[in-house]
Amino acid sequence: MGIDVVLPCLNEAAALPWVLGRMPDGFRPIVVDNGSTDGSAKIAAGLGATVVCEPQRGFGAACHAGLAAAVSDVVCFMDADASLDPGQLHRVSEPVATGAADLVLGRRVLRPGASWPMHARLGNAVLARRLRRRTGASLHDLGPMRACGRVALLRLGLVDRRFGYPLEMVLRAGSAGWRIQETEVDYLPREGRSKVTGTVRGTLRAIVDMRRVMARRDGAA
């Protein structure tokens, strides 16, 4: 059986041809359209991807809809904006597929031309430090390219449907005793502006969402 790849998508028409064209053999893209107005869903379908339409807006809502549509034992997640190379998906999926890890995150390595504002990198570093303390895993990046077991992830019962979803995944995995690893992946120039770091509103919204997840986990501890 192949590996399903969940690609949350909001107006990524310009990036999808490159992203889907780079998908390796054995990896099946599930593009979750989260209200695009640029024809992203039609483009993805035309390029052979499975398309899921998720009307509830939010990054976590799109990720969860893709997870619900997946059928493979191992499932991957990655952004659809061409900032990550699907050709490197094996770096995160192989340790999970071989049983060496339960969750693998791609640690982003900045490549020429890529945009990763300093405030975003500093915030990510602070968050990674808190995750190291919480989970005991040697994490340096809350990377958007990741892989884990599909059934095991569903059993974690993630509830965030906004930008806190990736953080909640790691926190709950750590609490459940998962073996969490990271591996380097290239961080490339994206198509278009980031939904998070590209605007003040997006950055603030992500901060609020992640603080809410942290507070919820603190209350559950």
Image (cartoon, rainbow, N blue to C red):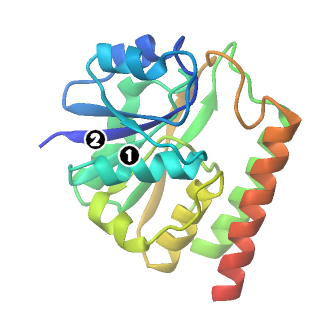
Q: Quadrant of residue 194?
A: top right
Q: Position of residue 105 (x, y in %)?
A: 49, 49
Q: Which residue in the structure is indicated by mark 2?
A: 4
Relative height, residue 173 to residue 42 (above, below): below
Callout 1: helix, strand or loop?
Answer: helix
Residue placed at 45% from the left, 17% from the top? 16
Residue placed at 64% from the left, 66% from the top? 132
Q: Quadrant of residue 36?
A: top right
From this viewpoint, which residue is outermost toward the left? Answer: 1
Q: Position of residue 179 (x, y in %)?
A: 41, 67
| Disc 2 from disc 1: Cα separation | 9 Å
Other residues around mark 2 within 10 Å, as few (<14) / some (14–19) / many (≥20): many
Q: How many marks overall?
A: 2
Residue placed at 24% from the left, 41% from the top? 3
Q: Is residue 37 left or right of residue 26?
A: right
Q: Which residue in the structure is indicated by mark 1?
A: 66
Q: Nearer the viewer, residue 51 or 8?
A: 51
Which quadrant does the N terminus fall into?
A: top left
Looking at the image, tell me whether mark 2 or mark 1 is earlier in sequence order: 2
Other residues around mark 1 within 10 Å, as few (<14) / some (14–19) / many (≥20): many
Q: Are marks 2 and 1 in contact (CB under 8 Å)?
A: yes
Residue 81 in view of the camera? yes
Relative height, residue 122 to residue 171 (above, below): above
> As shown in the figure, which amino acid type bears the numbered disc 1?
Gly
Residue placed at 56% from the left, 24% from the top? 81
Q: Is residue 112 left or right of residue 63?
A: right
Residue 95 in view of the camera? no
Q: Position of residue 147 (x, y in %)?
A: 38, 49
Q: Nearer the viewer, mark 2 or mark 1?
A: 1
Q: Quadrant of residue 118?
A: top right
